[in-house]
Image: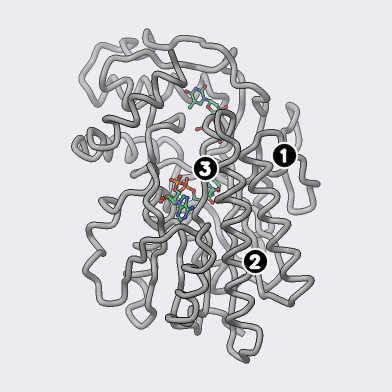
Amino acid sequence: MKQIQNKKILITGGAGFIGSHVVRLFVNKYSDYHIFNLDALTYAGNLENLKDVETAENYTFLKADICDRKQVADFFEKYNFDTVIHMAAESHVDRSITNPFAFVETNVMGTLNLLHAANNSWKNSDKNHLFFHISTDEVYGTLGDTGLFTEQTAYDPNSPYSASKASSDHFVRAFGETFGLPYIISNCSNNYGPNQFPEKLIPLFINNIINNKVLPVYGDGNYTRDWLYVIDHAIAIHLILEKGKIGETYNIGGFNEWKNIDLVKTLCKQMDEKLNRPAGESEKLITYVKDRPGHDLRYAIDASKINKELGWKPSVTFEKGLSKTIDWYLNNEVWLKNVTTGAYQKYYSGQYS
Ligand code: NAD
Ligand code: TYD
């Protein structure tokens, strides 16, 4: 039976990077569903990301913190959400090293509040409900030079960020087992694309190249990540919501592994071309800096389950996705300026000085 007969979808963290693409997709696709975006607007949340849908009739923004248990419960009571897509989180590994408490508060306690409220609201209902928890491949820990994370890989998180996400995944599963809460979990690899806050590798380096600032590559740069264009992640989320099986986990990945240093050199080349700078100019900005503590060597996803069972695969090649991403940042100078003043400067000097 299709789960997406539901009418009121709560998306948490919809003002953030991935959340804003998911909100846009759902608001535009489902004029007969109401999309609620609950977001605390932390440093990573930005309503500018949703300017084009903010006046849509089927969209409501709810400013709230998922750590506020009463507020969350009140919203469930008031709006009777049928489905939750839970994306609100503290999401940056480096920040989790300097302030792990915020990660436990939002990612663990905040998730628990949502689970508790959803369970209370749905326990005597005979409608179709779904708690769809958006997680990361980082819960699986790190790989050596070979191998892939499958849905069966044991959890082995190494950073406070991944430990908090792993914990939240366990709570979701526990609510399924203990209370019968209908849930799905997806674990995705590194996303990139428009609207990503410039603390993560790709947007941070784009911003630094624009401003002729050094490109701080951690360690020897030989760390590997799998990269997925954010809109392909949003499409996967939509597909899982429509066709995914309750109680299952789906790994989502780009079939697109890059060593950091190779990715950075590719980025530099494209930036030189787009900025009409001499070839090799941006590469000169590469600076090897002190490594991230506990730095995971390699993440790589086996996305064959979602591919075989739901027919999903990435639609955008990395070169094309990267080009579109750079163009977006070059065309959205004001957005970039607005998010890189004040608090960002303080964060930047604390992290990189
Ligand atoms: P982001 O940091 O860009 O956005 C997070 C959003 O959550 C922001 O809008 C922020 O305001 C909101 N938020 C934070 N704390 C909150 C709180 N206490 N209450 C309510 N709202 C709060 O994150 P993102 O990169 O878009 O990631 C979204 C989700 O996807 C996260 O759960 C993350 O773990 C997961 N994920 C991210 C990636 C990635 O590469 N970015 C990959 C896999 C999974
Ligand atoms: P990041 O974008 O923070 O994502 P994650 O840690 O969740 O994978 O980092 C991607 C890779 O880039 C990771 O190996 C760390 C590295 N990195 C740098 O070398 N320099 C930087 O300034 C940042 C932010 C990341």
Tag 3 residue: 91
Q: Is mark 3 within 8 Å of ligand 1?
A: yes
Pinpoint residue 333: horizontal percent, then vertical percent.
20, 35
Pinpoint residue 349: horizontal percent, then vertical percent.
39, 18
The type of colouring in the image is: one colour
Quadrant where the C terminus is found in the figure: top left
Is 349 placed above or below 69 here? above
Pinpoint residue 106: horizontal percent, then vertical percent.
55, 51
Name the amino acid type tagged 3: Ser
Q: Secondary structure at mark 3?
A: loop
Is 6 placed above or below 23 here? below
Pinpoint residue 304: horizontal percent, then vertical percent.
67, 54
The local crowd at label 2, few if under 14, some if 14 to 19, many if 20 or more residues have their Cα within 10 Å, is: many
Quadrant where the N terminus is found in the figure: bottom right
Q: Which numbered marker is on residue 184?
A: 2
How far apart in space, not on screen, are marks 3 and 2 (Cα)?
20 Å
Which of 110/336 is in front?
110
Tag 1 residue: 157
